[in-house]
Image (tube, rainbow, N blue to C red):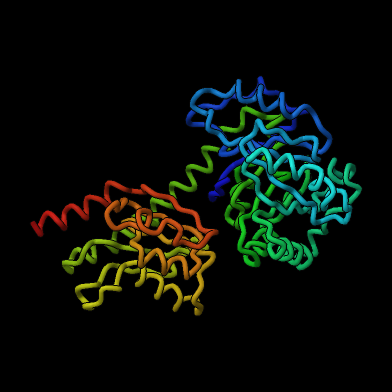
């Protein structure tokens, strides 16, 4: 299961969801469909019915199981979150249910993701609390929450799911998300109590990779488009704005008769490093735009790692730069034009940090035209 940044998951409970109310289109759909609940339901039949109702254009939407117990597993889905309730101390949901389902999940050859499920008090008693007989973590005790997440990573979990609970009055706060994001190197899922696009965006900005919305869409399925459009507008607007600044750096290289590649590095919506290609000027084959920008960013922050940063570069990074980006632990990479001859995707597709995500094709035409202008003059 590939985890990307700023993704929306809709959570459907087989016992409560009204599939007739779902209307996905090619332009308006969640990034994932999570299926599960605390009490049960016929998961197999539900997933089959769900698939039959998806338009052809949405058949590739990943259906991911979010099981409340071992009986809710079905091989009809695409992936399963192999959950362990680390916020509680009930062995039934720490390990016993996992043992009951282990063989059937393994033999299904389904994609499974070891996931730490951590319940944060959202101001209401949830079905998870009633079924498991456990208490949520106090949102005021951020250190305890962070320590629990660090333990999850040390145990080998690949995802952390911070959950305020179904119908929560208070969602998981950005302060909690931000603190956990800073402490661990695995993606975060955040759910519970998110009722507006602004609340969703606050979770994304704090570090959530996936935001899960359940109750709100059960009551207001027509509002899915509002959330999807808001996410697209925010992401596209920011990416294009910063890529435009990377293009300005590329133009500086072009003015020096350098291959026109530019780069900016952003953290907390602020530029912390800029650079453009200087290999001819410095007579240094390593003086690529990304290397210049990484050096500037580390000097700005006073440290060699950039885990909270996004790197924008006009052309797909080469192998050397991809390695440097990986060593710097940069969280997100955005590039404009692809480079099939020398790009990292051809030669080193795993060079980035395992936690990193990639967005390509942002202002691609503008980035490509600069390159074409340069090489046209050289012919």
Quadrant for residue 24, please give it.
top right
| Residue 215 shows up from this direction | no
Residue 38, how many percent across, how many down?
81, 38
Q: Is residue 246 left or right of residue 181?
A: left
How many circles with numbers are drawn on the protein? 0
Residue 121, how many percent across, how many down?
81, 52
| Residue 130 shows up from this direction | yes
Q: For the N terminus, give its image quadrant.
A: top right
Quadrant for residue 155, please give it.
bottom right
Toward the left, the furthest residue is 379
Front-most of residues 258 and 46? 46
Residue 174, how many percent across, how many down?
66, 57
Front-most of residues 76 and 312? 76
Q: Is residue 216 left or right of residue 241?
A: right
Quadrant for residue 347, please give it.
bottom left
Name the residue: 42% across, 52% down.
239
Name the residue: 53% across, 43% down.
231
Residue 97, how many percent across, how many down?
82, 45
Name the residue: 77% across, 42% down.
101
Q: For the C terminus, give its image quadrant.
A: bottom left
Name the residue: 21% across, 78% down.
283
Q: Is residue 275 left or right of residue 96?
A: left
Q: Is residue 59 above or below residue 7?
A: above
């Amino acid at each position: 299961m590939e985890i990307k940044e700023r993704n929306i998951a809709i959570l459907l409970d087989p016992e409560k969801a009204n599939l007739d109310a779902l209307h996905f289109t090619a332009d308006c759909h969640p990034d994932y469909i999570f299926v599960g609940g605390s009490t049960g339901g016929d998961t197999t039949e539900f997933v089959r019915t769900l698939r039959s109702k998806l338009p052809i254009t949405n058949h590739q939407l990943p259906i991911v199981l979010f099981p409340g117990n071992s009986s809710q597993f079905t091989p009809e889905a695409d992936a399963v979150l192999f959950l362990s309730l680390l916020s509680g101390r009930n062995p039934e949901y720490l390990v016993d249910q996992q043992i009951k389902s282990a063989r059937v999940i393994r033999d299904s050859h389904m994609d499974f993701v070891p996931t730490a499920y951590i319940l944060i008090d959202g101001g209401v008693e949830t079905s998870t609390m009633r079924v498991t007989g456990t208490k949520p973590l106090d949102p005021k005790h951020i250190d305890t929450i962070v320590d629990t997440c660090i333990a999850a990573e040390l145990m080998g979990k690949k995802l952390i799911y911070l959950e305020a609970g179904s119908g929560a009055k208070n969602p998981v706060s950005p302060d909690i998300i931000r603190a956990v994001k800073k402490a661990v190197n695995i993606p975060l899922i955040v759910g519970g109590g998110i009722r507006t696009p602004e609340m969703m965006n606050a979770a994304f900005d704090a570090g959530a990779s996936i935001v899960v919305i359940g109750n709100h869409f059960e009551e207001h399925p027509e509002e899915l488009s509002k959330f999807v459009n808001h996410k697209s507008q925010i992401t596209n607007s920011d990416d294009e704005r910063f890529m435009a600044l990377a293009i300005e750096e590329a133009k500086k290289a072009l003015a020096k008769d350098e291959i026109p590649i530019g780069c900016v590095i952003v953290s907390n919506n602020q530029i912390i490093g800029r650079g453009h290609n200087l290999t001819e000027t410095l007579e240094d084959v390593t003086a690529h735009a990304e290397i210049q920008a990484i050096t500037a960013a580390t000097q700005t922050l006073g440290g060699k790692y950039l885990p909270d940063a996004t790197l924008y570069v006009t052309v797909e990074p080469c192998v050397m730069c991809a390695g440097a980006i990986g060593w710097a632990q940069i969280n997100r990479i955005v590039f404009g034009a692809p480079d099939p001859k020398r790009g990292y995707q051809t030669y080193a597709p795993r060079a980035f940090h395992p936690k990193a995500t990639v967005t390509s094709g942002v202002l691609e035409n503008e980035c490509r035209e600069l390159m074409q202008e340069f090489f046209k003059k050289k012919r």
